[in-house]
Every structure is written in C-alpha cells, then in structure tokens.
Amino acid sequence: MNNNMDNLQSRFEKSLGLLTSRFVYLLQHSPDGILDLKAAAKALEVKQKRRIYDITNVLEGIGLIEKKTQNIVQWR
C-alpha cells in the first residue's frame, strides 16, 4: 500500500495542474512579467518542453499571456 501512495504522490508532482501552478508562480515573479521558456523549463525540471508549450498555449488562448518570441512570453 505504501508503494501505491508513493506512486500517487509522484504522479501528483508531475501533473500538468501542479506544473501550471509552478509556471504561473515563475511568471508572476519574473521581471516585468517576461519569462524565457527555456529558463522556465530548466527551473521546473521539465524533461519534455511540450508540457510548457501546452501551458503557454492555454494561457495565451484565454488572453492571459502573449508570446513575444518563440521562447519569450509576457503577461498581458
């Protein structure tokens, strides 16, 4: 049973929801609300940058951020 709890915790830590919360925290605390996606991926220890792009696409789609360049985003 303890192993199942460890697996559940591990999955939670890797969840897209938690990753989004951590990404938004980085964005909120970045100078001028500008964030380099490469730096964010490194800080968040993301192995697949696709997950970062999933987050930015949703945030951009609902009008919270805008992409300045391919790897730079900013709060609107």
Image (spheres, rainbow, N blue to C red):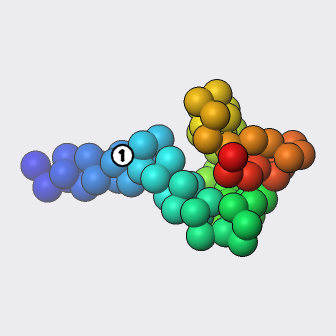
* Position of 29 relative to 9 (above/below): below
Disc 1 marks which amino acid? Arg
Q: Nearer the viewer, residue 23 or 64?
A: 64
Q: Quadrant of residue 66?
A: top right
SS under mark 1: helix
* Position of 23 relative to 42 (above/below): above
Would residue 28 be found to the left or right of residue 9 on screen?
A: right
In the rendered image, residue 34, in percent from the top left (x then y), is placed at 75, 60
Would residue 15 be found to the left or right of residue 57 on screen?
A: left
Note whether residue 54 is visible: no
Residue at (69, 46) in percent of width and height: 76
* Position of 8 relative to 45 (above/below): above
Residue picked out by circle 1 = 11
Residue furthest out toward the top: 61
In the rendered image, residue 52, in percent from the top left (x then y), is placed at 65, 44
Residue furthest out toward the front: 76
Residue furthest out toward the left: 1
In the rendered image, residue 72, in percent from the top left (x then y), is placed at 81, 52
